[in-house]
Image (cartoon, helix red, strand yellow):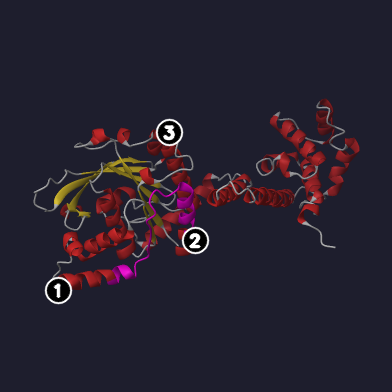
């Protein structure tokens, strides 16, 4: 007869649990190592949970843990019988020959606990899946969150010695020295900015802020052109405001250096067509992956970003822009929604171990002047969560003005691990493109 999953005994290893407890009684000094790996609820046996809990209390009191002190502690707590009695505790040291393999035993206990957690989570998800009032996307996000929380829950705390840190750092420096690569992160193509940041770094949240129509998207696409088209570094782009057709037009104008107005109107010369065809050929091979869903939900964005990294090996993601990401509760105050989004993007950057570059509008009072950190729109959480914050500033082009190259500036206002400063660049309105200023490389 088939045995259903519900009839099966959850995964456990009583012998390993007893070996951990017995080894601790033989070598109490190992408690400092085990306490960072195991919590009482990781034990399957209730009596073993009670014993380990008492051991933790002795450890917190700086008391020596042996059979006598443990029995005394349990007696005082009136839990000796619940722990299996004095005879059971005394027998624990007989289950293990020495304390040498305590780390191995502890990880066996942890392994079985993780399996029980997975069974519990899958049961909860199965029940939730039958609830048709719950949105399927919300269920998928819930599943992802629970699995990642479980992974974090079972992570052990690693302590690194100065020797280990220096060894790893010297290895990294030697690798950089041998590669002769000027930048350790993803290069933006803006020479002075890359000098300040060494490129966009892994796990960092980078914010680019500006007033509307100053050129946030153009700056992002100028960076993407260098990253994906020139350097062939896989790049993801979430365009929540502009359809992919408009993005394609801009990318072609930038790469071909043919005015967008000509491309839009079709009033092209033979030479223009040749330039566009050549540019399209270069972009055809570029590892750029674009999503143009308007008002995309945060849970969907996270899911697609994970797939981009897994399936397309994406090394940097751009989001245009934070204000167009929607949360599960659109009725919540704006500052709460923005705070949730910024924290989620920072967590996503760390999870995926890539830089995430998010565009952001700044407050109206920044109009006509250089923006600052206090003017990031929506929430102080953006400034707090971001590793790098930069602002784009230039004068607006008035109707009737000649469309010529225009001075612009990137204001590097915050960099958690480096210097701040201003980077002078050039804006080319015809191509909606930013470039290095001549004396900036």
In space, the residues marked 3 and 2 are separated at their CA atoms by 34 Å
Res 281 quadrant in image: bottom left
The residues tagged by marks 1 and 2 sit, at their Cα atoms, a distance apart of: 42 Å
Q: Quadrant of the C terminus?
A: bottom left
Question: Which circle, 1 or 2, is nearer the viewer?
Answer: 1
User: Residue at image x 48%, y 45%?
Assistant: 347
Label 3 with label 1: CB-CB less than 8 Å: no
Q: Residues within 10 Å of mark 3 (few under 14, many from 20)?
A: few
Q: Which residues lie in the magenta part?
A: 281-307
Secondary structure under tag 1 reads helix
Q: Is residue 337 visible?
A: yes
Q: Residue 274: x, y in percent?
A: 19, 73
Front-most of 143 and 313? 143
From the image, tell me which residue sits under label 1.
270
Q: Indicate the quadrant containing the N terminus: top left, top right, bottom left or bottom right.
A: bottom right
Q: What residue is disc 2 on? A: 310
Instruction: Pick the residue in front: 130 or 346.
Output: 130
N-term-proximal mark, 3 vs 1: 1
> Viewer-nearest of labels 3 and 2?
3
Q: Are marks 1 and 2 in contact (CB under 8 Å)?
A: no
Furthest residue toward right: 87
- 74 sits left or right of 314 in the view: right
Foreground label between 3 and 1: 3
User: Label 2: few (<14), some or many (≥20) within 10 Å?
Assistant: few
Q: Which secondary structure, mark 3?
A: loop
Q: Is 207 left, or right, of 299 in this rendering?
A: left
Q: Choose the circle earlier in sequence order: 1 or 2.
A: 1
Question: Residue drawn 24% across and 49% down?
Answer: 215
* Residue on which disc 3 sits: 333
């Amino acid at each position: 007869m088939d045995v259903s999953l519900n009839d099966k005994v959850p995964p456990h290893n009583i012998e390993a649990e007893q070996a951990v407890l017995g080894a601790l009684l033989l070598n109490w000094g190992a408690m400092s190592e085990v306490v960072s790996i195991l919590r009482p609820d990781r034990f399957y046996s209730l009596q073993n949970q009670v014993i380990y809990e008492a051991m933790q209390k002795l450890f917190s009191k700086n008391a020596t843990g042996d059979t006598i002190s443990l029995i005394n502690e349990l007696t005082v707590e009136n839990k000796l019988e619940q722990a299996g009695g004095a005879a059971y505790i005394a027998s624990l040291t007989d289950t293990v020959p020495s304390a040498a393999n305590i780390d191995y035993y502890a990880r066996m206990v942890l392994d079985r606990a993780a399996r029980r957690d997975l069974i519990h989570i899958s049961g909860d998800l199965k029940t939730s899946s039958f609830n048709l009032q719950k949105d399927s996307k919300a269920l998928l996000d819930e599943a992802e969150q629970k699995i990642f929380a479980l992974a974090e829950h079972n992570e052990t705390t690693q302590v690194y010695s100065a020797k280990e840190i220096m060894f790893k750092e010297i290895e990294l420096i030697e690798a950089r020295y041998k590669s002769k690569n000027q930048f350790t992160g993803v290069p933006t193509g803006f020479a002075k900015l890359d000098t300040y940041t060494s490129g966009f770094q892994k796990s960092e949240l980078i914010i680019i802020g500006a007033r509307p129509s100053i050129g946030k998207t153009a700056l992002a696409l100028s960076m993407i052109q260098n990253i994906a088209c020139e350097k062939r570094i896989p790049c993801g782009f979430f365009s929540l405001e502009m359809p992919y057709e408009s993005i394609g037009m801009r990318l072609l104008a930038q790469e071909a250096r043919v005015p967008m107005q000509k491309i839009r109107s079709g009033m092209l010369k033979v030479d223009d067509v040749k330039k566009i065809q050549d540019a399209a050929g270069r972009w055809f091979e570029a590892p750029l992956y674009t999503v143009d869903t308007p008002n995309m939900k945060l849970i969907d964005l996270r899911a697609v970003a994970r797939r981009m990294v897994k399936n397309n090996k994406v090394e940097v993601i751009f989001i245009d822009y934070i204000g167009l990401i929607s949360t599960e509760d659109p009725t919540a105050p704006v500052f709460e929604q923005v705070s949730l989004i910024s924290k989620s993007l920072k967590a996503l950057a760390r999870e995926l171990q890539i830089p995430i570059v998010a565009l952001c509008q700044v407050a109206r009072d920044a109009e006509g002047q250089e923006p600052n950190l206090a003017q990031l729109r929506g929430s102080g959480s953006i400034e707090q969560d971001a590793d790098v914050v930069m602002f784009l500033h230039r004068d607006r082009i008035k109707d009737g003005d000649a469309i010529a190259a225009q001075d612009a500036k990137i204001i590097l206002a915050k960099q958690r691990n480096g210097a701040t400063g201003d980077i002078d660049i050039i804006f080319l309105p015809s191509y909606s493109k930013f470039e290095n200023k001549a004396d900036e490389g």
